[in-house]
Image (tube, grey):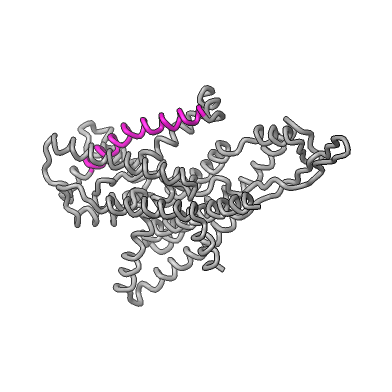
Amino acid sequence: MIIEKIRQIWKIKDLRNKILFVLGMLVIFRFIANIPVPGVDAAALKRLFNSNQILGLMDLFSGGGMKSFSIVMMGVGPYITSSIIFQLLGMIVPKLEEMQKEESGRQKITLWTRWATVPLAVMQAYAMINLLQRSSRNIITSVNSLDLIMMVVTVTVGTMFLMWIGELISEKKIGNGISLIIFAGIVSALPQTLSQIFLSFDKSQLFTLIGFVAIAIITVVGVVIINEGQRNIPVQYARQIRGNRTSGGSSTHLPLRVNMAGVIPIIFAISIIMFPSMVAQFFINAKTAWIANFSHWVINLFQDQLFYGIIYFLLVFAFTYFYTEIIFHPDQVAENLQKQGGFIPGIRPGRHTAEYLGHTTHKIILVGALFLGLIAVLPLVMRYFTGIQSLAIGGTSLLIVVSVVIDTVKQIKAQMSMRDYDGV
């Protein structure tokens, strides 16, 4: 069945070219992710990332580029942060909210998001380099001001290049470009991880292996359930009589998905939860006593397993609702139904339909947000009982991989369905 689907995809020239283009862009990304910035002790840097969960998650979003201090060490993190800022502003500033409803307005916001990515990338690159310089592990050797500027500029250009690649991929409608870049970074580390597990495996690590397998099975099943789950709202179209002809009168349904936001809430939540610790580590050696003490307090707070898990769950829960509000507009759906002569049985067209869709969506998303939040913190719960740090990072990686694969497969199927429809 799968082989037959692949053959069908391969026979469609346009779709085949799009998939090959996306694969080519991901190969380019993996190539530049292995080009290091000079002046760094790679072994000491790797040990630092392996011993710190927050840095491990940051490396996850850079596609492994941060651990190797490559020219794309910041990954798409600054672009994600910029996107979050403008989407939050869209909920607060009425002018931006109006712009989000129009195509020209969305294009302007996208342009502003790109511009804001530049200073964010500069600040994050400088903060990370400064943090590594102050580390007791002697990761970065002595660099002068010119070397520092060149490092920051190089890393910033790398981030903008990845942003450009991500947008090119998204234009092909074969998955979300930013998500696929993160996905490629996670998958590229899989062979090395598996080889390390098998080479160093002994009986004492049996529980660790069982933990990974359990997390993998539960995560895959859970993500598939919440991504495939939907509620079908019945829609009836009014019958129209024109002369001797009768049209309309058909009935269909409007699918409301349990998780409309996909993997975006997970990406947003991790981006936000990493930010306080990263900023705090930048001020940990400040000369002002209260700033240094506050920085230590923030770092210790986010290293607390219980606090970290609660915040992570709440952020995933909140961003699931938040992103659904951005991508699903009941008013527009109700207006389109009314224009097409459609209505929900028992519900008046217009405002009442919009209110019904909004209320129904909130109830459905409640289940999806709770389920997604529980799946997200499951690896942290396992880590709490086992004390194995890699379970948390590995579970988060698996969650992102499964969600991205499901979303990409759906987009490919949608394009195939469109071509079948055009053929008919």
| Placement of the N terminus among the 4 image quadrants | bottom right
Q: Residue at x 27, y 50 (%)?
A: 32
Q: Residue at x 18, y 43 (%)?
A: 133
Image coordinates for residue 69, horizontal then vertical, percent: 24, 49
Classify residue 219 as left or right of residue 52.
Answer: right
Image coordinates for residue 145, horizontal then vertical, percent: 13, 34
Q: Which residues are magenta?
A: 104-131
Classify residue 339 as left or right of residue 178.
Answer: right
* Tally of numbered tags: 0
> Is residue 91 something that shows in the picture?
no
> Is residue 103 something that shows in the picture?
yes
Query: What secondary structure is the stretch in magenta mostly built from?
Result: helix
Q: Nearer the viewer, residue 156 or 336?
A: 336
Magenta-span inclusion, residue 389? no
Image coordinates for residue 274, horizontal then vertical, percent: 37, 44
Does 208 sit above or below residue 326? below
In the image as oriented, which residue stretches furthest toward the right?
244
Q: Nearer the viewer, residue 305 or 225?
A: 225
Q: Nearer the viewer, residue 274 or 191?
A: 191
Name which quarter of the figure residue 360 lies in: top right
Q: Residue at x 31, y 49 (%)?
A: 55
Q: Residue at x 48, y 67 (%)?
A: 214
Image coordinates for residue 115, horizontal then vertical, percent: 36, 30
Q: Nearer the viewer, residue 202 or 406?
A: 406
In the image as oriented, which residue stretches furthest toward the top?
95
Classify residue 224 as left or right of residue 128.
Answer: right
